[in-house]
Amino acid sequence: MMRSWWVRVAENGVWVALGLVLWVASPVLGEWIDDVVPRATISRRTIWELVGIGLLALPPGHLLGQWIVLAMQLTVSGTWGSEGRIFLSTAYYGNVLLSITPWMAAGAVVRGWAHHMVPGE
């Protein structure tokens, strides 16, 4: 049975919240940097490109963190022989790609949008 889209969004709510926080915080971050370092000239385009980089970099970083935690759990419980085979499953990596690709695509779109549409340097 296929889960509905909102269940998948709820399961990955951390990324939705993170994306919204980065989106809302990017103009404020630019103003804050100007207040902290008055001579720094950071354009709105640069801030949006940083948000795009964040969306590109955080999902693989989160995945790496999940792998480290899983490896530690399997080591502590001594179940590498039975449960460690998940790392050999192509279905597992297919699910991984399905879960992080939309967020990385969003990061690429934000970077492209910032580069071509936001006035800057």
Image (cartoon, rainbow, N blue to C red):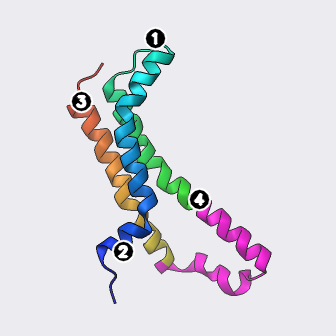
The secondary structure making up most of the magenta span is: helix
Circle 1 sits on which residue?
A: 38
Disc number for residue 7: 2
Tell me which residue sits at (40%, 15%) in the image.
Answer: 41
Q: Earlier in the sequence, mark 3 or mark 2?
A: 2
Disc number for residue 118: 3
Q: Compute the Cα span from label 3 to label 2.
A: 34 Å
Query: For this view, does 96 lie left or right of residue 7?
Result: right
Local SS, label 3 = loop
Query: For this view, does 20 lie left or right of residue 76?
Result: left
Asked if marks 4 and 3 touch (Cβ < 8 Å), the reply is no
Q: Quadrant of residue 112?
A: top left
The nearer-to-camera label among 2 and 4 is 2
Q: Earlier in the sequence, mark 1 or mark 3?
A: 1
Kindly tell me whether residue 27 is visible in this rendering.
yes
Q: Amino acid at mark 1?
A: Pro
Relative to the observer, which residue lies in front, 38 or 95? 38
Residue 2 place in picture, x, y as percent: 32, 85
Q: For residue 28: magenta?
A: no
Bounds of the magenta span? 65-91
Local SS, label 4 = helix
